[in-house]
Image (cartoon, rainbow, N blue to C red):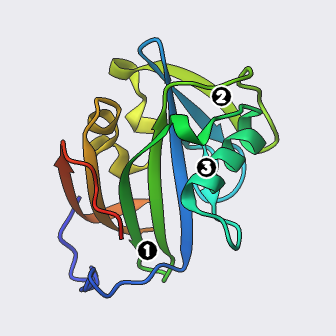
Amino acid sequence: MHTSPAIPEIDWTRWEPTIRANLVFVIDDGKVLLIRKKTGLGQGKINGPGGKLDPGETALQSAVREIHEELHLTLDPADCEEMGVLRFQFVDGLAMHVVVFRAFAYQGTPTETREAAPLWFSFDEIPFEEMWADDRYWLREMLDGQHFEANFIFAAEEMLWRDVRLSRCAPVEG
């Protein structure tokens, strides 16, 4: 991370996203289900399954739909726990609001699709070097049960700035 003068000043209290999305991390027997993205933003990177909200969907409805589309898994919404929010501002103008969930129960077998290839990792073997730069500042803590709120500024794939707040308290709805 560097302190480039090109980092935009952002009033995060007034910030508005251009895209609303979600990530959902399935945890089973001390391992987390990740994917290698085969399409879209972050293609080739390892990430959690998820995607953009369709019109009228909640973040949770979208997470359940996306993991089914990407990996052919079925999640019960009651088994999904909202863990936090990621806000990404890219210097090219893209602004993403991402709600993050974790789940401990699922039905089906993770199956590769045209969008994603499933990969299981133990918590201490998460391949951060193949992931977005922000993940190392919240992912492991979230898997261990910490709630969070985080803001990031990126130039393409380079993280320029971060503000990550972790807590054991549930996030405030809003």
In the displayed structure, 11 sits above or below 4; it is: below
Q: What secondary structure is found at the residue carrying circle 1?
A: strand
- Which residue is at a point 28% across and 61% down the rendered structure image? 172
Q: What kind of element bears circle 3?
A: helix
- Numbered disc 2: secondary structure: strand
Q: Which residue is mark 1?
A: 90
Q: Quadrant of the N terminus?
A: bottom left
Say which amino acid is labelled 3: Ala
Rendered position, 22 above or below 155: above
Question: In the depicted view, which residue is nearer to us: 26 or 56?
Answer: 56
Answer whether residue 47 is visible to the viewer in this image. no
User: Which residue is labeled 3 in the image?
Assistant: 63
Along the polypeptide, which appears first: circle 3 or circle 1? Answer: 3
Question: Residue shown at 29%/34% (left/top)?
Answer: 145
- Distance from disc 3 to disc 1, alpha carbons, whole Å, reads 23 Å
Task: Say which quadrant the C terminus sits in.
Answer: bottom left
Residue sitting at 67 percent across and 41 percent down?
67
At horizontal 17% and vertical 47% (from top left) the residue drawn is: 167
Distance from disc 2 to disc 1, alpha carbons, whole Å, reads 27 Å
Who comes first in sequence, dot 2 or dot 1? 1
